Image (cartoon, grey):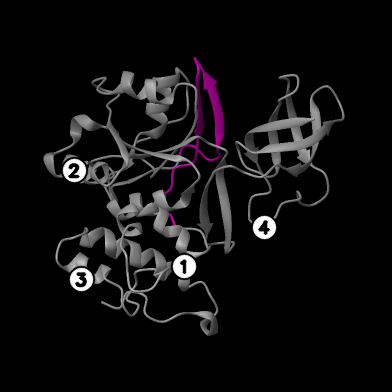
Amino acid sequence: MRFQIWRAINNIFLARSIDDGRMYTARIKGKVLRKSEAEYSAASVGDIAAGEPYSDTEALLTSLEERRSAFVRWNAKREMNQTIAANQDMTAIVVSPSSPPFRPRFLDRAIACSHGADILIILNKSDEADDAVREAISGYARIGFRTIAVSSATGEGLEDLRSLLEGRITAFVGQSGVGKSTLINTLMGTEQRTAGVSEKYNRGRHTTNHSLLIERGGISLIDTPGVREIEVPFEDESLVMEAFPELSGCRCLYPGCLHHGEEGCIVPDLAGKGGISEDRYTSYLRILESIESRRPIYQRKRGYGNR
């Protein structure tokens, strides 16, 4: 029997049978599920798993199907990759103009954590956005990312957002306090827990503490825990370039150039002369450096960020 994971808490899962539509409380048979790479999460919301029921309400999961997409972050405490959502059609990254303030570097890293899914950048609390924030979001639109401005307070953009979400599975991710859960409640008529922002630190308080798949009215959303910081997973650095489409078209002297200062690389000059965004290029270099810093010293490369 095949199951779709709807909720995952401490290796106990809420799983819906794809065969008969029934919900089961599911556990893992043995210590780990069979999959190609070790990671912190045994299974994640959105995963498709094989298994068998052993009662009317309980089932054992034995293996995972290959994921077609995922949002994966680096779990610094466990020093392992951690999948937050899987098999989504789209990753919606929710940002706010203030409280907490808009952070382009966070947005760049969140984009780099998503693979195999379309990216949608949602400027939430748009009624609070000034011209500088709106122009920054427009910059992402100019390099090919889909963006939308919405406000639960004024209703701006909500119907357009619903149209983008219909018929798809969308993972919602963002910093704590950007209003992600409030936005989901507005869209879905749900009652996800919400909280304000710490006045002392201007940072959000965590309210959603686990991922959850929600379906209503033709829309399927994966609500994920808000975070204050996010790190790109430990992987092949060439995958990071997928989050920076403006770099992928640069033709350097050697094929496979990672654009971090190698001989014959043209990108540093382009960034210095305004051919590409210098801020985005710096963000790209910092992501590469963070991945490289996790390797043993003897395996590290030289040249990251040589500008």
Task: Measure the C-alpha gap from mark 4 to mark 1.
Answer: 17 Å
Whichever of labels 2 and 1 marks the residue nearer the N terminus, that label is: 2
Which residue matches tag 3? Answer: 269
Instruction: Pick whichever of labels 1 and 3 is earlier in the sequence.
Output: 3
Question: Which residue type does callout 2 highlight?
Answer: Val
**Residue position marked by numbered label 2 in the rendering:** 133
**Rendered position, 245 above or below 132:** below
Q: Earlier in the sequence, mark 2 or mark 3?
A: 2
Circle nearer the N terminus (2, 4): 4
Q: Mark 4 or mark 1: which comes first in sequence?
A: 4
Residue at image position (83%, 49%) is 30
Q: Residues within 10 Å of mark 3 (few under 14, many from 20)?
A: some
Q: Label 1 crowding class (10 Å Cα cut-off): few <14, some 14-19, many 20+? A: some
Res. 117 mark: none
Magenta stretch: dominant secondary structure: loop
Tell me the distance, in whole angstroms, between the alpha carbons under discs 2 and 1.
28 Å
Q: Position of residue 7 (x, y in %)?
A: 62, 34
User: Residue beneath label 4, please?
Assistant: 37
